[in-house]
Image (cartoon, helix red, strand yellow):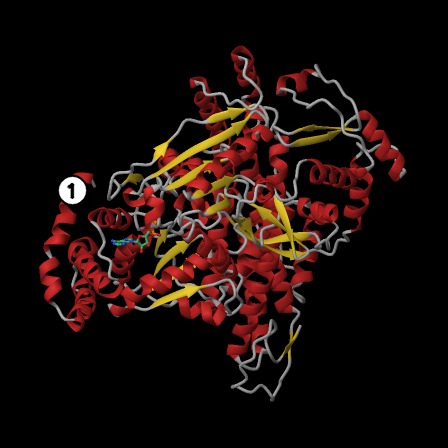
């Protein structure tokens, strides 16, 4: 829909105003029932929208004393049509979501309002929930601490506030449930995603994983960790182009290992390899039998050289927690894959969690694409609009601000060293502080924020430091960051979603001053920092302070900037202000954004393969849980057919006695007493005869079972158990080969096509194995008469009652 049409709808909504104002609370509330009836009678949500939005507007005015502005109504229309509304900070996105969530909840199929942390979910549910409850809808919130029963109740509400993580994990857990009652979510109907870019882009780089433990020891991690600490790092930066690497040219080695920070690769040199061999008493590290050792050494090196405490991860209560390098947010429950997490645990001397195997996994891309309809809100999505369109099918539509933005965004200043930069920042903070103007300083890492904090402390400047560790407390601090004299240091994500309001003195003094201490990898994150100032027409200013030693510069633009510095010949401590500066920064950012997009796209392509299979398995599981009978005859036929094919197919028309014998051996192992059948003319006929016999034998077996419903339960539980265990192995296999795939991506073969073929073969094989194991178990089950099965026993266990394996 064009913006012009949307404006027309806004007018329509506003025309209802007078009518709504005249209604009593009771009459306003009864609109909800009326709308539901109209829907029943064939009216569409689109038809209802203007009046329904007018109802919410009026209700919001009565309950919260806020009436959505026209731009908010506009945002609400965009959300209803399944797109992303780009609205600046302070425009009131929380209230915007109240409109489409009300309208879409009228269908009674549930609406999820997705936030990035528990604190926001609870806060928004509490606040906006009042409006919906006033209008007679139910509102729930899902928090990390909740029990399955509480979750189920929350998901059953008309509108549910929940974080992206809880949503994803509940989805995975629901698909591991053994009984239908354990399922907490309803179908994925409509989602409104707050901070959509953060959820759909930044977080989408790491999939959600539910993992189990493998039996492996963790000792090797410790040994390798201690060992690599004795090695010496080479000086070179080990940057080789692929071409150099292939032609074997340009490799200059020194030290025991070399680090390439840009591509995040560490490798042993010849010397290093020899030391490993000596230490572990082996001949040749390259040989296949030492694959695992090689992997562990590599992990220990990566953990010790590339992974940095308080930048990539933090240690809290004896646990290594990942920090999202984009947002600075801690990601509880996530672990680095493939042993890297354990290697870091060894490095930090905390308890090493057992090697985990992946039991269930999904990317946010696949997850959110399961919704019938989804929409998003963000302050900064436009630069990523192509990805949001390509991957999620949503357009990003910028909504004008309610009042014009008058914040002054000043040109970047570049210093030669980090220290000079920080001194300049401190000086600027001091000036503002003495004047009384509030300052918010954004840093990329927890380390930087602590460094800056100690500098400010030395200067005697009182300030708060926020690291996105405690959302609630930080939200309170950020909320008062607009008071005069306030000085706040925050990593990107800290206190996000909380409005910074100015007091009158601050407004006089020029509003909130934003200082960025580093350019981010993405322009979007810079804009988010800036956007914290200048809300709703407030005054404000922003500036980034950079240095040649910043990561972004160091890796992507240092040489160029260095030469400019030299040409101009600046004094120590004097900043560079040059037109080519912002160009160089922008170019470096674009390059990284591009890289990150390819990483996500690649992840997505792999996940699509898994997604097809996941859909098949999850659908099947769901049906079984809902009570669908297991199609025994189909399973028997599948088993017979595949077994016959396995032993007897192939180019030769005639089978020899050996093949036939092997076939019947196999079948008899699974189905005792099957015997043999006479030779037949062709495979199909043979399969038919054998299937019929197997089905008859199963009928006889089933007749031994005292009660038919018990048999059905045995079948269901066995089948699920076997399906799950094979499926988990399969996922783990998929995960590992995906991680391995990029290592083998040389040559002409397309790694994804290769992966796809492999996975589908593996999947078919798995289905066969499942049928075989399932039949074998059933045919070997001894059904015993038990008189003590009480009907009212409700306790569920993995095993059905009354049967022995
Ligand atoms: P955003 O998430 O877009 O940055 P918030 O949802 O945090 O903005 O809202 C910013 C502030 O504006 C909040 O204090 C909210 O209560 C207030 N607000 C939102 N909409 C309105 C409105 N229509 N009238 C008055 N105040 C509003």
**Is 801 placed left or right of 187 in the picture?**
right
Depth order, front residue of 417/289:
417
**Residue lying furthest top in this view?**
567
Residue 586 locus on image (x, y percent): 45, 25
Q: Quadrant of residue 559?
A: top right
Q: Decide: few, some or many residues near mark 1? Use Cα within 10 Å; few <14, some 14-19, many ≥20.
A: few
Residue 157 in view in this figure = yes
Q: Position of residue 548 (x, y in %)?
A: 57, 24
Q: Is residue 502 above or below residue 285?
A: below
From the image, tell me which residue sits under label 1.
Answer: 5
| Furthest residue toward front | 434
The quadrant in which residue 666 appears is bottom right
Is residue 291 rendered to the left or right of residue 426?
right
The residue most toward the bottom is: 787
Image point (72%, 48%), residue name: 348
Q: Nearer the viewer, residue 588 or 142?
A: 588
Q: In the drawing, does residue 35 fall left or right of residue 184?
A: left
Which quadrant is the N terminus positioned in? top left
Badge 1 element: helix
Q: Residue at x 17, y 58 (%)?
A: 54
The answer to which image quadrant residue 5 occupies is top left
């Amino acid at each position: 829909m064009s913006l012009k049409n949307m404006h027309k709808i806004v007018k329509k909504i506003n025309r209802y105003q007078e009518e709504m104002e005249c209604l009593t609370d009771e009459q306003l509330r009864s609109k909800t029932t009326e709308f539901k009836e109209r829907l029943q009678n064939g009216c569409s949500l689109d038809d209802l929208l203007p009046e329904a939005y007018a109802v919410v507007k009026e209700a919001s005015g009565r309950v919260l004393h806020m009436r959505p502005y026209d731009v908010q109504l506009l945002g609400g229309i965009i959300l209803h049509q399944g797109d992303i509304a780009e609205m600046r900070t302070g425009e009131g996105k929380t209230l915007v979501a109240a409109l489409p969530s009300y309208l879409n909840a009228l269908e009674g199929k549930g609406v999820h309002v997705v936030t990035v942390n528990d604190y926001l979910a609870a806060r928004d549910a509490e606040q906006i929930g009042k409006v919906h409850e006033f209008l007679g809808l139910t509102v729930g919130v899902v928090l990390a601490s909740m029990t399955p029963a509480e979750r189920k109740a929350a998901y059953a509400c008309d509108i549910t506030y929940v974080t992206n993580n809880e949503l994803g994990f509940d989805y995975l857990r629901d698909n591991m449930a053994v009984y239908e009652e354990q399922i907490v979510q309803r179908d994925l109907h409509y989602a409104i995603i707050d901070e959509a870019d953060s959820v759909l882009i930044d977080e989408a780089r790491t999939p959600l994983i539910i993992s189990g433990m493998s039996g492996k020891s963790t000792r090797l991690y410790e040994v390798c960790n201690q060992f690599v600490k004795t090695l010496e790092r080479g000086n070179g930066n080990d940057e080789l182009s692929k071409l150099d690497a292939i032609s074997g040219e340009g490799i200059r080695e020194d030290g025991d290992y070399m680090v390439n920070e840009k591509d995040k690769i560490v490798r042993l040199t010849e010397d290093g390899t020899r030391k490993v061999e000596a230490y572990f008493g082996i001949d040749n590290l390259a040989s296949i039998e030492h694959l695992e050792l090689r992997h562990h050494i590599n992990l220990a090196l990566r953990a010790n050289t590339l992974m940095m405490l308080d930048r990539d991860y933090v240690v809290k209560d004896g646990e290594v927690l990942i920090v999202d390098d984009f947002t600075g947010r801690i990601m509880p429950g996530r672990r680095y894959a493939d042993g890297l997490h354990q290697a870091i645990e060894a490095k930090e001397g905390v308890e090493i969690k057992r090697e985990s195997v992946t039991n269930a996994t999904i990317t946010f891309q696949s997850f959110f694409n399961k919704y019938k309809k989804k929409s998003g809100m963000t302050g900064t999505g436009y630069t990523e609009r192509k990805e949001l369109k390509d991957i999620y099918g949503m357009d990003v539509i910028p909504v004008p601000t309610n009042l014009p933005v008058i914040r002054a965004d000043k040109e970047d200043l570049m210093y030669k060293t980090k220290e000079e930069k920080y001194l300049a920042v401190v000086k600027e903070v001091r000036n503002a502080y003495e004047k009384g103007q509030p300052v918010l300083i954004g840093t990329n890492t927890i380390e930087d924020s602590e460094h800056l904090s100690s500098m400010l402390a030395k200067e005697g400047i009182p300030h708060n430091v926020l690291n996105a560790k405690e959302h609630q407390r930080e939200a309170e601090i950020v909320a008062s960051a607009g008071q005069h004299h306030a000085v706040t240091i925050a990593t990107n994500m800290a206190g996000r979603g909380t409005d910074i309001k100015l007091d009158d003195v601050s407004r006089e003094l020029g509003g909130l001053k934003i200082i960025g201490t580093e350019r981010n990898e993405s322009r979007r994150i810079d804009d988010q920092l800036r956007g914290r100032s200048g809300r709703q027409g407030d005054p404000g200013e922003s500036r980034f302070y950079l240095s040649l030693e910043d990561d972004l510069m160091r890796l992507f633009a240092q040489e160029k900037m260095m030469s400019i510095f030299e040409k101009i010949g600046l004094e120590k401590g004097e900043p560079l202000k040059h037109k080519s500066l912002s160009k160089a920064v922008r170019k470096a950012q674009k390059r990284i954004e591009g890289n990150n997009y390819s990483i996500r796209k690649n992840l997505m392509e792999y996940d699509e393969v898994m997604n097809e299979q996941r859909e098949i398995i999850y659908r099947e599981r769901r049906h079984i849980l809902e009570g669908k009978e297991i199609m025994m005859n189909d399973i028997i036929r599948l088993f017979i057919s595949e077994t016959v094919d396995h032993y007897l197919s192939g180019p030769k028309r005639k089978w020899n006695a050996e093949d036939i014998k092997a076939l019947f051996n196999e079948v008899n192992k699974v189905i005792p007493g099957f015997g043999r059948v006479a030779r037949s003319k062709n495979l199909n006929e043979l399969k038919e005869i054998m299937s019929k016999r197997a089905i008859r034998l199963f009928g006889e077996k089933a007749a031994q079972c005292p009660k038919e419903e018990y048999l059905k339960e045995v079948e269901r539980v066995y089948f699920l158990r076997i399906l799950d265990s094979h499926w988990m192995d399969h996922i783990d296999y998929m995960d590992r080969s995906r991680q391995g795939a990029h290592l083998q991506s040389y040559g002409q073969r397309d790694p994804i096509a290769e992966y796809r073929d492999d996975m589908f073969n593996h999947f078919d094989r798995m289905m066969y194995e499942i049928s075989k194991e399932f039949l074998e178990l059933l045919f070997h089950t001894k059904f015993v008469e038990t008189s003590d099965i009480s009907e009212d026993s409700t306790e569920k266990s993995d095993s059905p009652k009354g049967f022995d394996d």
